[in-house]
Amino acid sequence: MGGPVGRSSTSGEKTRSRVRRADRLGGGEGGSGTGGGSRDAEGGDAPASGGGGRRAEGHRRGGSAGARGRSSRRAPKSGKRRVLRWSASVLAVLILGTGGAGYLYYEYLNGNIKKEDLTLGDRQMADHKANAAGQTPLNILLIGSDARDSKANQKLGGAKETFGATPLADVQMLLHLSADRSNLSVISMPRDTMLKMPKCTAPDGEVFPASTRDVQTNESLGRGGPGCTVATWYELTGIRIDHFMMIDFAGVVSMADAIGGVPVCVDANIHSRSADGKGSGLKLEKGTTSIQGEQALQWLRTRYGFEDNTDLGRAKAQHQYMNSMVRELRKGTKLTDPAKLMNLAEAATDALTVDKGLDTVKKLYDLAEEFKKVPTKRITMSTMPNVYGTGVNSGRVYPKAGDAEQLFRMVRDDVPLDGKASKRKKPEEPKDPSAPVGEIAVSVRNGTATDALGPASGRAGHVADQLKDAGFGRTTIDSGDVTGVARTGILYPSADLEGDAQAVAKALGVPLSQVKRSTDVSGISLAVGADWREDGAYPVSKGTEKTPESAGALNGEEEGACMKVNPNYTW
């Protein structure tokens, strides 16, 4: 498809063709090679930024660099609703043109988008459960690749020894949009998280067997592509993932330029550069600065200089940037110029790799419209609760027992992370009501084994006794299958047994989201998982809907957030 149609940001200006150069930021080529999960995402020799960036006030006076030299006429003052409505109308015209140049441009943008399989794992992801209004949540996995496979990425990424190496998924964030679209929850997984990888089959047929040891989560991208990162998330969390979006260094810069300046804050002067060359090169003065382009990439990559120089501080900085970006965009002053809107459309489609369910601009636009329904005050950023490893894994992190599963369960159950009362209606009762508990046949097996521990002795028998005490007289123990499962689950084979399976869950305090239909069973089958190795009530019961403090929740309207600078990286 040919290049985009010419356009102008002011009336009367001559239209100009926008032919994209091969080495322009945002371009990329496929790369291959080998890489290690311990590679520093900041790189060893990324170019440093001089002068500490632009101050927020001065940047607003100077306009946006995203216009790249074109006239940047200021939008007339008007109500917020009017500006947003006008912007949405312009976007609709741009992407939904049905004839002539509009159609050609639409097809051009579609051709920019790179597509890959959603999941490369063997396990089929469970379906969402609809709420009483028939609505279902939406889960999007954002992946930041450290690929150094193009001139632009190599210039921005530094670390020459990694050029052409297998890319790593150094940023991983799950965006959960609630079923009623009232709230948005984000969970970051630190790239240093150690876990088991599931079996992944690459699109070309290459098979990556399940790992027998813990490896860093960012290595998942090298096991066939982003579909293996999705499979790894599902293996750990049990959260159905509907879509993914992946972006590389150059893509971040081009989109940050198109969006314009985003204010961020540090509590001291910072220069992310050590004597041995480590660091992103970020250099800012104390206080609030508006950043964009390469400086925005530096902020998002900075580890050396924030808090304790770990990936946990970097995740906090990413959360602050994302919240601030949303606030800026919702002020209605960023994208009121058609040329800037088209810049963003080109930058986004050129920068992103998505699953095949998001393969057109129309689908991406519709997705953005869903996210716009959530008010800023109902956006909650969090990090997977974790603990540090020891010995050879010192500096690496592991999911924190209890807290991590609690956070995952809240997302699986569509519970808001901001602690506000949910307006969700109670789930509909199954169409086929439960039979008398004394008539329900249940098979219980011990699935408490983990990679490090064998099955906990007697767990199937103990849980079976609890069911019998609750009146489930037809409960039996399945002693044949000892395959371990991460979390307790109840499977049923057909719709007429859904009510019976839910009755079993209610009797034990197991969340209904862990009751699934499956053709792998012939009757109701309860697998006692590794999350229930100890006697007593099921550890994550209804009523525990509080976000763990260890998740470091940050609200979208918290404008006073400021990153703590490590004293060794100040000036």
Image: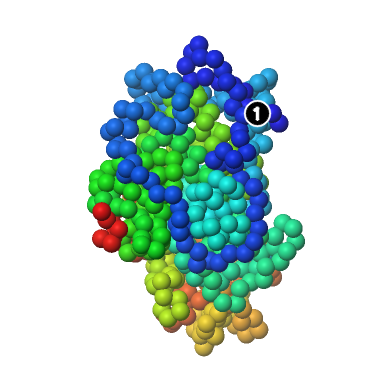
Residue at the spot 27% in from the left edge and 43% down from the top edge: 288
Image-based side of 201 in relation to 272, left or right: right
Residue found 70% across the figure and 60% down from its top: 202
- At mark 1, the secondary structure is loop
Q: Is residue 21 left or right of residue 421?
A: right
In this rendering, the answer to whether 409 lies above or below 532 is above
- The image position of residue 86, as x and y in percent, is 45, 22
Residue at image position (33%, 58%) is 305
Amino acid found under the numbered disc labelled 1 = Gly
Q: Height in image: 331 above or below 159?
A: above
Q: Quadrant of the N terminus?
A: top right
- Residue 216 showing in the rendered view: yes
Residues 350 and 489: in front is 350
Residue that lies at the very extreme toward the top in this rendered image: 12
Residue at the image point whose x is 46% and y is 66% from the top:
192
Judge from the rendering whether residue 230 lies leftward or rightward of residue 551; answer left or right.
right
- For label 1, count other residues whose C-alpha is less than 10 Å away and answer few (under 14), some (14-19) or many (20+): few
Q: Which residue is mark 1?
A: 3
Quarter of the image holding residue 473? bottom right
In the picture provided, is 296 more to the left or to the right than 148?
left
Q: Is residue 470 visible?
A: no
View extreme (bottom): residue: 457
Above or below — where is 516 with respect to 104?
below
